[in-house]
Image (spheres, grey):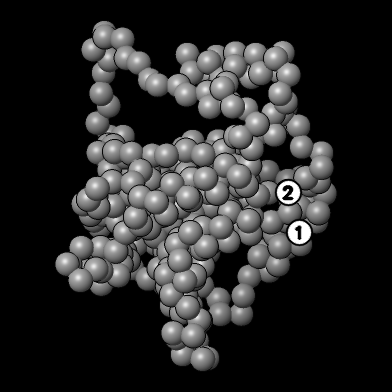
Amino acid sequence: MMLVIDAAMSAIGVIVLLILIIILHYQAPVGSWGSISQALIYHQVRKYLLLLDVRKEHVKYWRPQILLLVSRPASVFPLMDFINDLKKSGLYVIGHVQKGSMDDSSPNLDPLHEVFPYWLSLIDYLKLKAFVELTISKSIREGIQQLMRLSGLGAMKPNTVVLGFHEKFPTETTLAESSLLKDLRFSRIDRAAVVEYFTASDYMPREPNGLYERLDSEEYVRILNDVIHINKNLCIARYFNHLDKDVPRGWNGKKKFIDVWPVFIQKPGETGLGWGNRISERFVTFRFLFGLSE
């Protein structure tokens, strides 16, 4: 009816209304009574997750569903950002194991209760589309086993595990406030506090010699073996602390080569990957792996 009476004033009124809605959406204070949109999203997500059936998986809609194991985010945040680009509409879970026991903490307080908000704020400031999973265990290996088996929900569970290379010395801390977004309106922890928490000298336990407590080589190899036995894809990352996406490096015209190790060729029965032992099946898998490496 408004359009019939005065089309110009009706258009102006609609525009003003839209501007007011936008201003209220971005400038209004956060309500303490909760958000109805979160309740609606929860209902829809639960409904569609139940429709995802793990028994109906097919290569046609395979997605990289990645579990990134992080010890010190202050030294690997470029890798966290790289995996965020790599996931390509798939699941992205950042997992961390805190060494300890529930018996070591207060009987009424979860030792990870105060840690979790800092991880969520770090994810927000790095602008990562990822979930955070934290666990506490008496050994790093047992904690990683927990994360590999329990991360995700329903059919959305990680199929690829990424972890850092076992360096002789820990990588240096490169996290700074300039690496993060500006303070976010909805974040309860400002970025200066996030950087201070993850770069604190007592963030990770230390050995008597003053160096950070680290995995020994034997336990690291056992963790790699666990990943393969649980039938997950395994990626080992190295030197991502030198990655700077803002400074592109041109190709110098020289060919570069990578090493490809098809471990199933000589002893397929010992890999535990579930592939067939027939010659034809091994040949197809062989061609597929080398095709991907080209």
Quick check: 250 above or below 100? above
Quick check: 33 above or below 136? below
Expressed as whole percent of the image width and height from the top left, the position of residue 102 reads: 50, 81
Q: Residue at x 73, y 19 (%)?
A: 278
State the residue position of label 1. 46
Q: Mark number for residue 155? A: 2
Asked if the residues shown at circle 2 and circle 1 are in contact, with their CB atoms under 8 angstroms apart, the answer is no
Q: How many marks?
A: 2
Q: Residue at x 73, y 54 (%)?
A: 154
In the image, 275 versus 149, the foreground residue is 275
Tell me the element at label 1: helix
Expressed as whole percent of the image width and height from the top left, the position of residue 205 reads: 30, 70
Q: Quadrant of residue 270?
A: top right
Q: Residues within 10 Å of mark 2 (few under 14, many from 20)?
A: some
Expressed as whole percent of the image width and height from the top left, the position of residue 212 reads: 25, 63
In the image, 229 versus 15, the foreground residue is 229
Q: Is residue 36 left or right of residue 293?
A: right
Q: Quadrant of residue 42?
A: bottom right
Q: Is residue 231 left or right of residue 183?
A: right
Q: Is residue 264 left or right of residue 258?
A: right
Expressed as whole percent of the image width and height from the top left, the position of residue 173 reads: 23, 54
Q: Nearer the viewer, mark 2 or mark 1?
A: 2
**Is residue 22 visible from the viewing direction of this image?**
no
Quick check: 77 above or below 201? above
Q: Residue at x 35, y 16 (%)?
A: 257
Q: Residues within 10 Å of mark 1 (few under 14, many from 20)?
A: few
Q: CA distance from mark 2 to mark 1?
A: 12 Å
Q: Residue at x 47, y 71 (%)?
A: 138
Indicate the amino acid at tag 1: Arg
Comes first in the chain, label 2 or label 1: 1
Quick check: 242 above or below 204? above
Indicate the amino acid at tag 2: Ala
